[in-house]
Image: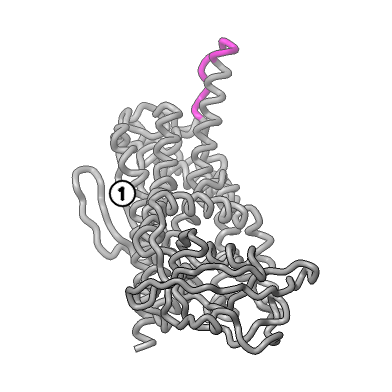
């Protein structure tokens, strides 16, 4: 049963990730079609096509490896200078460009291949090309994917915080301390019986109020108790639906970090429970996670290098460090196969999917091709050039030819592949674990 639950957790994560990728691409697809761009393909995954169906001018399909996705838009880049003909002649220009290729150098070949692939998308597209759109429309299309992931993360965190709730220490007593400790963090006893036990409290009792002040959770109750060492306090206790008032005097316990100061202690341990939070708690948590993930992305090369070193040294990995899809799958499997109540396990996986969507949002905003942020930078640079030409009363410049950046794109892709490989290897050999 545990193995089956583990497998179910992994499958749920893979399906959730595939849905996240699908919605990301829809975030690109919808505005692209709304702005009139011809979209040839909408694909989830990479590798061989498992199945596809054409609706109108667009082929929709799923590929073997659900580790990404893409839409194919006509004219992502402008025609290369060597093939600047009318749209009707683009096909012939494509053939001539292939015949004119005289350099076999690796990066030049990459650039030429990118231009040829782009030229194919221009055939018959006429004015329905991405590069002809105003800058703001290009930016909207490219940001649509990441912001779809942010929206999905907000929904998932709202479900997590307001639907399932957050594990909270309640005012219901789970157990009683047998004695008063010698200090606030000590396990040694200073006296034999704690005040709560002396007053007759029992496991299952719920603290309703203290000195007339209602307490919503254990944190509020603890703050009142700790602030009143040696002072008698009236506790309203609910036991099996019946309320009664008991007087308890918190024992004065020295603080570990400041022996001259004391805090109150009565000796009760709380019961944990999922408590629903306000609707704004989920969006707030999502935005906070954006900042945390952005900090990881900025330091990603260093953190991956540190992770790689643990493969050699055998040291423990940073629990807050980056994970591969394999590592996230292991965490999801452990959540699903844990001994926690089913609602806690489901909530854990929902939270994990929310965090993965935050990661997709932030990562795709990195201003490097082939990521969405890189395409945004290209569009903005094109807009700046055109604006400066108008200000300087110069002829409109040619559209920015991003195919010239293909060598840099190749380096970025290679670096991402290496970092991904290191993380996958680490997640297999030295995995992070909930256990």
What are the residue bounds of the magenta stretch?
390-399
Q: Residue furthest top?
A: 393
Residue 383 image point, x, y percent: 51, 26
Residue 64: image quadrant is: bottom left
Q: Is residue 334 visible?
A: yes
State the residue in front, 361 or 236.
Answer: 236
State the residue in front, 430 or 158.
Answer: 158
Number of numbered discs overlaid on the protein picture: 1
Compared to 49, does 146 lie above or below? above
Helix, strand or loop at disc 1?
strand
Residue 17 image point, x, y percent: 39, 62
Q: Is residue 329 visible?
A: no
Compared to 429, does 44 lie above or below? above
Residue 70 image point, x, y percent: 38, 51
| Residue located at (46% from left, 70% from top) | 207
| Residue located at (49% from left, 59% from top) | 213
Q: Residue 397: within the magenta?
A: yes
Quarter of the image for the N terminus: give it: bottom left
| Residue located at (29% from left, 34% from top) | 34
Question: What colouring style does the render use?
Answer: one colour
Say which residue label 1 marks: 41
State the residue in front, 366 or 291.
Answer: 291
Magenta segment's dominant SS is loop
Q: Mark 1, residues whose alpha carbon is within 10 Å: few (<14), some, or many (≥20)?
A: many
| Residue located at (54% from left, 64% from top) | 219
Residue 312 image point, x, y percent: 70, 79
Relative horizontal placement of residue 119, taking residue 306 as reference (left or right): left
């Amino acid at each position: 049963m545990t193995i089956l639950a583990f497998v179910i957790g992994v499958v749920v994560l893979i399906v959730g990730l595939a849905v996240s990728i699908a919605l990301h691409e829809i975030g690109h697809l919808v505005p692209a079609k709304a702005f009139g761009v011809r979209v040839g393909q909408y694909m989830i995954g990479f590798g061989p096509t498992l199945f596809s169906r054409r609706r109108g001018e667009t082929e929709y399909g799923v590929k073997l490896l659900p580790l990404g996705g893409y839409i194919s838009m006509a004219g992502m880049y402008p025609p290369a200078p060597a093939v600047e003909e009318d749209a009707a002649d683009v096909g012939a220009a494509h053939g001539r460009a292939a015949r004119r290729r005289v350099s076999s150098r690796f990066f030049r070949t990459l650039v030429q291949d990118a231009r040829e692939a782009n030229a194919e998308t221009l055939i018959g597209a006429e004015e329905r090309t991405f590069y002809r759109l105003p800058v703001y429309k290009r930016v909207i299309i490219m940001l649509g994917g990441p912001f779809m992931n942010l929206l999905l993360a907000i929904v998932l965190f709202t479900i997590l915080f307001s639907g399932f709730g957050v594990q909270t220490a309640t005012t219901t007593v789970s157990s009683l301390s047998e004695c008063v400790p010698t200090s606030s963090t000590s396990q040694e006893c200073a006296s034999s019986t704690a005040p709560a036990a002396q007053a007759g409290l029992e496991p299952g009792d719920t603290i309703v109020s203290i000195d007339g002040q209602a307490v919503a959770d254990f944190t509020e109750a603890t703050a009142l108790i700790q602030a009143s060492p040696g002072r008698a306090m009236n506790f309203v206790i609910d036991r099996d639906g019946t309320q009664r008032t008991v007087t308890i005097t918190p024992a004065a316990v020295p603080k570990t970090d400041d022996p001259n100061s004391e805090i109150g202690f009565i000796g009760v341990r709380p019961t944990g429970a999922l408590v629903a939070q306000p609707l704004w708690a989920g969006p707030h948590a999502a935005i906070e996670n954006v900042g945390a993930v952005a900090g990881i992305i900025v330091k990603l090369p260093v953190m991956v290098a540190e992770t790689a070193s643990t493969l050699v040294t055998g040291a423990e990995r940073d629990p807050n460090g980056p994970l591969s899809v394999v590592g996230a799958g292991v965490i999801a499997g452990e959540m699903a196969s844990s001994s926690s109540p089913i609602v806690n396990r489901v909530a854990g996986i929902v939270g994990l999917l929310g965090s993965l969507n935050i990661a997709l949002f932030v990562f795709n905003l990195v201003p490097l091709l082939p990521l969405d942020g890189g395409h945004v930078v290209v569009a903005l640079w094109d807009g700046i050039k055109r604006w400066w030409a108008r200000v300087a009363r110069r002829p409109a410049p040619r559209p920015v030819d991003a195919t010239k950046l293909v060598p840099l794109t190749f380096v970025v892709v290679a670096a991402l592949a290496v970092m991904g490989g290191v993380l996958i290897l680490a997640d297999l050999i030295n995995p992070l674990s909930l256990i």
